[in-house]
């Protein structure tokens, strides 16, 4: 008797649950259709925005948009597919937080023009709702952005980021990963463009492949454009890696913070035309002065250079020929880079000069206005003076016949106004030859007089006439720091090889403290 009644109750309960589920599904389906109509009406109210297909899932937690087009003030954005997954309506109703589990953005073309600078606080000042997304996925997105005098073009951007949060006070995210194919950046005020083949990023490292900074115009056009001396530079970087970038700090314009930059197998080419004088009205800041002037706080733990190279080509004013001096196998480390007052930055560098001799440098930079002092401790392994004859093509009448340097140590103390220091230059059997217009004929008498009366042919330790040298150079403010370094070192060679009566008083060995 009780068993049929029990079965009837179970069947009733099952029917009730089924009916309830069907009712809920039907209710949500009706709501989803209503939501679709509501969203379509809202989109139709926005004249800059159009969507060909809108679908709301029956459970109302997923929103799908297809063929989205946005046009306003020269901005043009198209997206074939946008997905908003797992919309948490309760948080929206309770605390005005738009909380999504995931957003998927596919096949987007973004064209932005006339972008204006806006601070983060202004951008989100009137943002009424908080916006949170657990995961954002971007696939195959192309970006073409124009901001006043700047242009940026990025192809095939694919990105993933987690915990995106936007509110009136902040924009932040975590664990970003992205990759792009070719990209290009130009600035109308610059003569250069910056391009790359690929960027690949994971949670820790951003790697740039085959980056290239090169002039927009030819060498001949460059010389015609600039009446004063302006070096033409070109930089090729097969691989540049940056570790642990704080993207949130960059986006919010608070600071640039990262752990490490690795620059590998890079080639920097510099072409200088000595037929032109430097611009008398130009001002070239020192490296530490340039860093200190940055408006954005910078904190980089370490910069590493591996197997890089610098080629310096100089077009002679007298011979019209190109002379080349290069530094290869450049390995260096720079530690604790910050742009705060009184901070000291250390650079340790090792390289080959003309692929033959090792040069070691230990440089300290102080971020101390207004002088911005620095010190350089350096040495070069033993070398033959003759190997620099190719560089002496700058003056076709001078050649070095012989000479071996057995020791070169120097210390330079410089700042924004001058540089001075001490040099140890040990050598033997230095002989110089003078040529007339025919390079094969040596002017014997002047050569004899120079080698026997003007220069010091030997400077050997523990001999009677052995001496060390002084360095001094007053810095022209329209020349670079490297110019000052070279001419300071050149003055040290001069103070050892030439007689004291020819040297200026700053290099006179009787006035070492001058």
Image: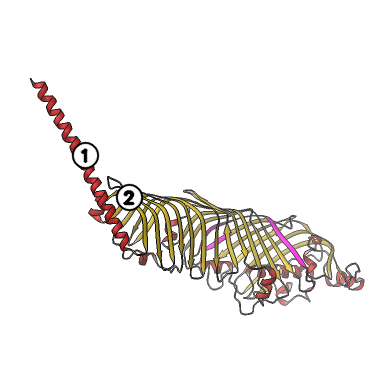
Picture quadrant of residue 386: bottom right
Q: In the depicted view, which residue is nearer to us: 395 or 512?
A: 395
- Residue 330 within the magenta-colored segment of the rendering: yes
- Write the residue at 74% across / 66% down: 468
Q: In the depicted view, which residue is nearer to us: 244 or 340?
A: 244
- Sequence order check, earlier mark of 1 and 2: 1
Q: Position of residue 344 (x, y in %)?
A: 54, 63
Q: Position of residue 313 (x, y in %)?
A: 72, 65
Q: Position of residue 282 (x, y in %)?
A: 61, 77
Q: In the depicted view, which residue is nearer to us: 224 or 255?
A: 224
Q: Is residue 154 left or right of residue 41?
A: right
- Write the residue at 18% across / 31% down: 14
From this viewpoint, which residue is outermost toward the top?
1
Q: Is residue 297 left or right of residue 450?
A: left
From this viewpoint, which residue is outermost toward the bottom?
281
Classify the position of the C terminus by image quarter. bottom right
Vertical side of 69 occupied by 11: above or below: above
Vertical side of 18 occupied by 302: above or below: below
Picture quadrant of residue 15: top left
Q: Is residue 487 left or right of residue 49?
A: right
The residue that disc 1 covers is 22
The Cα–Cα distance between marks 1 and 2, rounded to whole angstroms, is 21 Å
Q: Position of residue 472 (x, y in %)?
A: 68, 72
Tell me which secondary structure the magenta stretch mostly adopts: strand
Badge 2 density bin: few <14, some 14–19, many ≥20, Cα 10 Å: some
- Residue 475 within the magenta-colored segment of the rendering: no
Please give the range of residues in magenta.
317-346
The residue that disc 2 covers is 55
């Amino acid at each position: 008797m009780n068993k049929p009644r029990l079965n009837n109750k179970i069947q009733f309960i099952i029917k009730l649950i089924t009916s309830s589920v069907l009712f809920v599904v039907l209710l949500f389906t009706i709501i989803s259709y209503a939501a679709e109509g509501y969203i379509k009406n809202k989109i139709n109210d926005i004249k800059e925005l159009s969507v060909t297909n809108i679908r709301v899932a029956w459970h109302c937690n997923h929103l799908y948009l297809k063929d989205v087009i946005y046009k306003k003030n020269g901005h043009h954005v198209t997206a074939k597919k946008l997905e908003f997954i797992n919309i948490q309506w309760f948080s929206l109703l309770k605390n005005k937080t738009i909380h999504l589990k995931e957003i998927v953005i596919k096949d987007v073309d973004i064209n932005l023009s006339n972008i204006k600078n806006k601070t983060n606080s202004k951008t989100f000042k009137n943002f009424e709702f908080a916006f949170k997304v657990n995961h954002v996925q971007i696939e195959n997105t192309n970006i073409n952005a124009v901001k006043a005098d700047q242009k940026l073009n990025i192809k095939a951007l694919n990105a993933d980021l987690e915990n995106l949060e936007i509110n009136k006070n902040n924009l932040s995210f975590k664990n970003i990963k992205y990759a792009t194919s070719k990209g290009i950046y130009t600035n109308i005020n610059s003569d250069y463009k910056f391009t790359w083949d690929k960027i690949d990023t994971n949670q820790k490292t951003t790697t740039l492949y085959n980056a290239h900074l090169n002039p927009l115009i030819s060498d001949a056009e460059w010389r015609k454009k600039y009446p004063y001396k302006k070096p033409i530079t070109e930089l090729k970087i097969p691989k540049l890696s940056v570790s642990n970038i704080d993207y949130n700090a960059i986006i919010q314009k608070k600071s640039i913070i990262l752990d490490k930059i690795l620059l590998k197998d890079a080639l920097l080419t510099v072409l200088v035309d000595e037929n032109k004088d430097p611009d008398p009205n130009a001002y070239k800041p020192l490296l530490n002065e340039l860093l200190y002037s940055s408006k954005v706080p910078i904190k980089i733990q370490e910069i590493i250079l591996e197997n890089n190279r610098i080629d310096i080509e100089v077009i002679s004013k007298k011979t019209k020929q190109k002379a080349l001096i290069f530094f290869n196998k450049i390995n260096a480390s720079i530690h604790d880079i910050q742009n705060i007052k009184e901070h000291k930055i250390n650079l340790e560098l090792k390289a080959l000069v003309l692929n033959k001799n090792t040069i070691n440098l230990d440089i300290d930079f102080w971020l101390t206005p207004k002088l911005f002092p620095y010190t350089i401790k350096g040495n070069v392994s033993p070398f033959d003076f003759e190997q620099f004859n190719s560089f002496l093509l700058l003056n076709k009448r001078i050649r070095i016949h012989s000479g071996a340097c057995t020791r070169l140590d120097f210390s330079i103390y410089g700042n924004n106004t001058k540089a001075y220091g001490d040099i140890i230059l040990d050598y033997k059997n230095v002989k110089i030859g003078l040529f007339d217009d025919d390079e094969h004929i040596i002017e014997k008498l002047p050569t004899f007089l120079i080698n026997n009366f003007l220069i010091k042919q030997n400077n050997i330790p523990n001999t009677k006439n052995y001496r060390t040298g002084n360095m001094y150079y007053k810095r022209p403010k329209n020349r670079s720091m490297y110019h000052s370094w070279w001419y300071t070192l050149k003055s040290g060679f001069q103070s050892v090889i030439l007689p004291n009566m020819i040297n200026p008083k700053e290099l006179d060995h009787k006035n070492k403290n001058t």
